[in-house]
Every structure is written in structure tokens, then in C-alpha cells.
Image (spheres, rainbow, N blue to C red):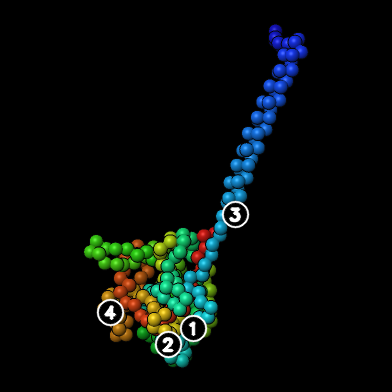
Amino acid sequence: MNQVFQSTDPASRGRLARVAVLALAAIVTLLSLALVGLGNGAGADQTRAIKTVVLGQSATMPDPACPDNCQVVASVNGFQTRTATSTTPFEVPFDGKVTQFRLYLGEPTGRDRTALNDRFGSPPQAAITILKKVTTPQGNEKFQLLRKSPIEGLSKELGTVATFKLNKPLTARAGNYVALAVPTWAPIFALGQSAAQNKWRASRQPGMCTAASIDQSSPQLKVDTKRFYGCTFSGSRLLYTATLTNG
């Protein structure tokens, strides 16, 4: 038989009621704090600052050398190390992902295009890469290729500003570099710029920096390889940008 205790003392019943009210108030308070905590967490996620920058962007981009004085980038990787507005235009400022890149392409004449295809291969091509600066056991500075985008054919984009959105954005860490890779050739090159304000580095061996050495040059395309970027050129500019976001 169930037994139920019931006090017949009014004072006792009053004390029990007050205890029940206090217990209920405590439960409500705990639930409220829990909900506030959850709300703060969600708010923190929602209000986290989304940063997006366009590496290499300038108010105006120089005109490509082609077709007037048609010089191109060929069989090499490279990244701009200085522009008129930045001393680190392609150094990654925060952890994020590269979601797209843009090329400012000249348009070679038919004759120049045939000559470039014969010398460097066809069609004109480019990709974007993520590099990390490393030091070898011998104390030499090299760059390790961490990630790269698909190689894009440029034949239909010559003479345009072409944007390539990446279906698989490339992870980049603060301090990495975003560089171009040109397996064949690409008219994304501006001449006649200020030598003090325009510099870029190429993936060539030190001492192999003359025009006569271009046929010994090759692009860096294999992930995890380490290469010298031993040639710095002044007074010219690689005409590309890359969009980085942490969103």
C-alpha cells in the first residue's frame, strides 16, 4: 500500500511551499544562464569578423606589354615582391583560403602567338600556387610548393581581364606567398615600371637570370617540391591578383 505523508501543520506546509518556490526559481535561473551562454556562443560565431583581401590589387593596373612590345612570362613560377602601393603584395596576411585569381592579359599578334607557341608550347597557360619559404640544411632559402590550382588554358581569354574561380579554394597560412605558375607562356607582363617600386622573383637558379637563360627555366608544378627563386627582376610587373578570405 502506497504511503503518502502529508503534514497537517499549516506552518510546515508554508515552509514546504517556500522551499518549492525557491527550488523552482533556481531551476529557472540555471536554464536562463544556459540559454544566455548558448546565445553568446552563436553570436560570437555570427559576429566573427569576415576578412577578404585582394592580394596584388592596385587602383589601376599597368597595361600588358603585348601587343606593342610583346614580352611574356614563360616556363616559370613567379610572384611580385613589390608594387607602388605595397612592399609585400602577395604575402598572405592571415590564415584563409584563396578563392579566385585574376589575370590581366595582353593580346599578341598572330605572328607573335605562333612564335611563342613554337618556342614555349601551346596553348598559353597559367595556374596559381601557394608557397612557403623554407631554409635548407645548408642554410639556403627556397620555396616549397604547398598547393596549386588547376592549370587554365588562356587562348580564349587573350586581350581580356580573366577571372578564374576555384571550385576547391586553396588553403593559405599567414606568411605564405601566392605565386603564378606558367607552364607554357602567358602575356601577363608589364614593362616600363618604376624599378624601385616594381620587383618580382622567378623560380630560377641563382645566376640564371639573363634572357639567354630562359630556355633552361622550368615552372614549379609538383606539390612539396622546393625550389630556388633566385632571380629578382625590377621595373616590370606580373599582372595578376588573388582573392583571400577567412570566411
Per the image, the residue denoted by label 2 is 192
Per the image, the residue denoted by label 4 is 208
Q: Nearer the viewer, mark 2 or mark 4?
A: 2
Q: Residue at x 50, y 74 (%)?
A: 57
Q: Are marks 2 and 1 in contact (CB under 8 Å)?
A: yes
Q: CA distance from mark 1 to mark 4?
A: 27 Å
34 lies left or right of 63:
right
Q: CA distance from mark 3 to mark 1?
A: 38 Å
Q: Could you tell me which secondary element the residue under label 3 belongs to?
A: helix
Quarter of the picture holding the C terminus: bottom right
* Residue 62, label in figure: 1
Q: Could you tell me which secondary element the residue under label 2 belongs to?
A: loop
Q: Please state which amino acid type lies under the numbered disc 3.
A: Thr
Q: Residue at x 46, y 68 (%)?
A: 150
Per the image, the residue denoted by label 3 is 47
Q: Nearer the viewer, mark 3 or mark 4?
A: 3
Mark 3 / mark 4, whichever is N-terminal = 3
Tell which residue pokes out farthest to the front in this image. Answer: 11
Mark 1 / mark 4, whichever is N-terminal = 1
